[in-house]
Image: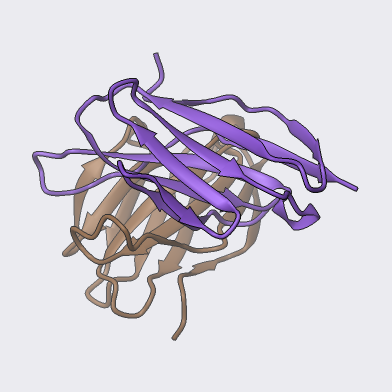
Amino acid sequence: DAGVTQSPTHLIKTRGQQVTLRCSPKSGHDTVSWYQQALGQGPQFIFQYYEEEERQRGNFPDRFSGHQFPNYSSELNVNALLLGDSALYLCASSLSRDNYGYTFGSGTRLTVV
Amino acid sequence: RKEVEQDPGPFNVPEGATVAFNCTYSNSASQSFFWYRQDCRKEPKLLMSVYSSGNEDGRFTAQLNRASQYISLLIRDSKLSDSATYLCVVIPSSSGGSYIPTFGRGTSLIVHP
């Protein structure tokens, strides 16, 4: 039973570029949440997708967008990258309305230079 | 005031010591509480849920104090392998039907020989 898989594991981008991160949820999960974790900080909620729609969004600018596909996998897109976007991006999957079933992927470490 | 606050530490303790962490939360309507463990450059993993009656899992004890709005984690007989960052997670009640975990910044624990 595969857990949450994220790709790529590491990425280096230049300021102003765009990036797409991918996440496949744990088998049986239908909800995907994205978090940004800066060094020395806790994960910060970006948004959550359920039934291919953004269900809730954290305090992130519109440069951050996402998508969920019919197979429940998800993408996180970030446009016009800033140096401050350098972080570990975590995807967590869960079964809708289940408070206890968050499973995290190992993350994508994005470095913006 | 941040929604979830933790002392970042580090807590530097010898093997065999007992150590306790606290985490305060600001939303009195919060419903669910958890402790996650995060090893260096890895994803967070669920350590244990926190119940009002308190709960114990081996050397780990978690407690919730709703009146004072804090949760605690006690680790007895510390092992070298307990060295990690411990993240406090709070899930507020939600009118939208989605439950978004809010993470603290984590408390770093270093257990030395």
- What residue is at 64 percent from the left and 43 percent from the top? B85
- What residue is at 80 percent from the left and 53 percent from the top? B80
Q: Position of residue B79 (x, y in %)?
A: 76, 54
Q: Is residue A11 above or below residue B95?
A: below
Which residue is situated farthest in the bottom direction here? A1
* Chain given the colour brown: A
Q: Is residue A5 above or below residue A99?
A: below
* Chain given the colour purple: B
Q: Of A7 and B26, which appears nearest the observer?
A: B26
- What residue is at 79 percent from the left and 34 percent from the top? B12
Q: Position of residue A89 (x, y in %)?
A: 52, 50
Relative to A42, is B64 on the left or the right? Answer: left
Q: Of A36 and B79, which appears nearest the observer?
A: B79
- What residue is at 40 percent from the left and 59 percent from the top? A92
Q: Position of residue A44 (x, y in %)?
A: 44, 38
Residue A43 in view, yes or no:
no
Which residue is situated farthest in the left direction here? B95
Q: Of A41 and B83, which appears nearest the observer?
A: B83
